[in-house]
Image (cartoon, rainbow, N blue to C red):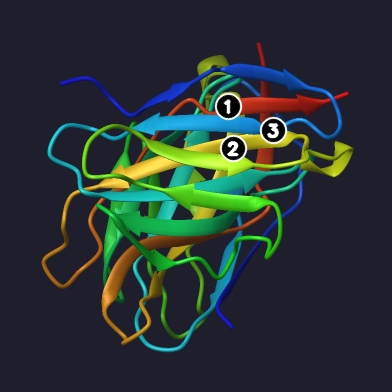
């Protein structure tokens, strides 16, 4: 079945360092890909998404490009801030029973990012 | 427009009791998803409901767990005879009807269930 694999954390960086969190996926068909962020004690918030190959999602300085040839969707930021400290989840949308698009998501295990001042 | 509302935020139950978790989707959203996050793990899909219908319950344990989304009122995830292994954060997400491509699912803040 479909699955998402992301790099294990924790990832500890100094403020203004570059960030890359790797994410690869296995899927039949053409899923949409997402990055969600979970701040301490809160629910998940959508950070960015890409719905087709070569799309680039971006938000708050974060970017990720949907690479079909490498089945990857790596999250990048050029200069992290302390406020970026959170758990980041890569996810893909699953196909419904009859192959239609749904919002059922398959998540990776999450990567904890800790940014130190 | 209020977001997805889950209550309670924290729930403590003794082994063998029942746990009822509530989720009110965003206004205009007719699709609800429940996910479970076990300690140190990612979110796992449990069940997908539309009003009065269970669409996909492939992630739901076969026993003790049930979910509903009635015509009126919130969606309820019910766990009977809870065991310690049920301790987790349970997240609800809602979305509007899609147009052939996935739309964004909005998540609630979760209910943290502790079984003692």
Would you say B116 lies left or right of B23 here?
Answer: right
Q: Are marks 2 and 1 in contact (CB under 8 Å)?
A: yes
Instruction: Compare residues A87 and A13 and report the one nearer the observer.
Output: A87
Image position of A74 with respect to B104: above or below = below
Residue A8 position in % (x across, y down): 76, 51
Q: In whole angstroms, how far apart are the C-alphas of marks 1 and 3?
A: 14 Å
Would you say B105 lies left or right of A38 here?
Answer: left
Would you say A91 lies left or right of A50 here?
Answer: right
Mark 1 or mark 3: whose residue is earlier in sequence? 3
Residue placed under numbered mark 3 in the picture: B18
Residue B38 position in % (x across, y down): 74, 43
Residue B25 is at least partly visible in this image:
yes
Residue B39 position in % (x across, y down): 78, 38
Work out whether disc 1 and disc 3 sit on a shared chain: yes
Q: Residue at x 68, y 61 (%)?
A: B61
Residue placed under numbered mark 1 in the picture: B111
Q: Residues within 10 Å of mark 2 (few under 14, many from 20)?
A: many
Any mark on residue A6, and which? Answer: none
Q: Quadrant of the N terminus of chain A?
A: bottom right
Image position of A20 with respect to A86: above or below = below
Callout 2: SS = strand
Residue A46 position in % (x across, y down): 37, 40
């Amino acid at each position: 079945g479909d699955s998402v694999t992301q790099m294990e954390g924790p990832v500890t960086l100094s403020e203004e360092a570059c960030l890359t969190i790797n994410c690869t996926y296995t899927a039949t068909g053409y899923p949409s890909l997402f990055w969600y962020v979970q701040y301490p004690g809160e629910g998940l918030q959508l950070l960015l998404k890409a719905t087709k190959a070569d799309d680039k999602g971006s938000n708050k300085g974060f970017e990720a490009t949907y690479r079909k040839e490498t089945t990857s969707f790596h999250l990048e930021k050029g200069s992290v801030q302390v406020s970026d400290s959170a758990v980041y989840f890569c996810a893909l949308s699953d196909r419904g029973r009859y192959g239609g698009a749904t919002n059922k998501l398959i998540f990776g295990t999450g990567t904890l990012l800790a940014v130190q001042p | 427009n209020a977001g997805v509302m889950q209550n309670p935020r924290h729930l403590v139950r003794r082994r063998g009791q029942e746990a009822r978790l509530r989720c009110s989707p965003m206004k205009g959203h007719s699709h609800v998803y429940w996910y479970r996050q076990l300690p140190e793990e990612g979110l796992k899909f449990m069940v997908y409901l539309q009003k009065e219908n269970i669409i996909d319950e492939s992630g739901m344990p076969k026993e003790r767990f049930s979910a509903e989304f009635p015509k009126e009122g919130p969606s309820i995830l019910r766990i009977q005879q809870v065991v310690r292994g049920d301790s987790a954060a349970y997240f609800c997400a809602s979305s509007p009807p899609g147009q052939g491509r996935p739309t964004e699912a909005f998540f609630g803040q979760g209910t943290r269930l502790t079984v003692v």
